[in-house]
């Protein structure tokens, strides 16, 4: 169900691919950052104790 894009098919398709890749990279970056922050927080809580 792909619309006929005519002579711009390559440009439009590549724009979609680049946009999807950037979104996936951003999601991956957020997941990795969240894991890193969680590890640092767990280490800090272990060092200080959970209730200060």
Image (cartoon, rainbow, N blue to C red):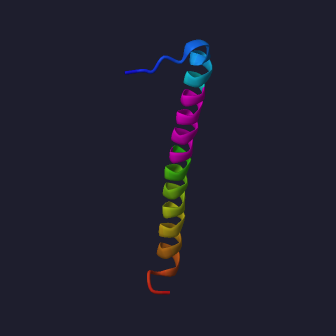
Decide: is 15 above or below 31: above
Q: What residue do we see at 55% from left, 22% from top? A: 13
Q: Quadrant of the N terminus?
A: top left
Measured as percent of width and height from the top left, residue 34 is found at: 51, 57
- Whether residue 29 is in magenta: the answer is no
* Magenta stretch: dominant secondary structure: helix
> Which residue is at the front of the view, 13 or 4?
4
> Which residue is at the front of the view, 41 or 12?
12
Count the labels in the image: 0
Q: What residue do we see at 45% from left, 21% from top? A: 3
> Which residue is at the front of the view, 24 or 41?
24
Residues in magenta, as a range: 15-27
Decide: is 14 above or below 21: above
Q: Residue furthest left?
A: 1
Measured as percent of width and height from the top left, residue 43 is found at: 51, 68
> Which residue is at the front of the view, 38 or 1?
1
Measured as percent of width and height from the top left, residue 6 is found at: 56, 13
Q: What residue do we see at 44% from left, 81% from top? A: 50
Q: Residue furthest bottom?
A: 52
Q: What residue do we see at 47% from left, 73% from top? A: 46
């Amino acid at each position: 169900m792909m619309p006929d894009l005519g002579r711009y098919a390559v440009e439009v398709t590549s724009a979609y691919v680049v946009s999807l890749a950037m979104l996936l990279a951003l999601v991956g970056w957020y997941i990795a950052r969240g894991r890193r922050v969680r590890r640092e927080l767990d280490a800090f809580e272990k060092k200080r104790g959970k209730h200060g």
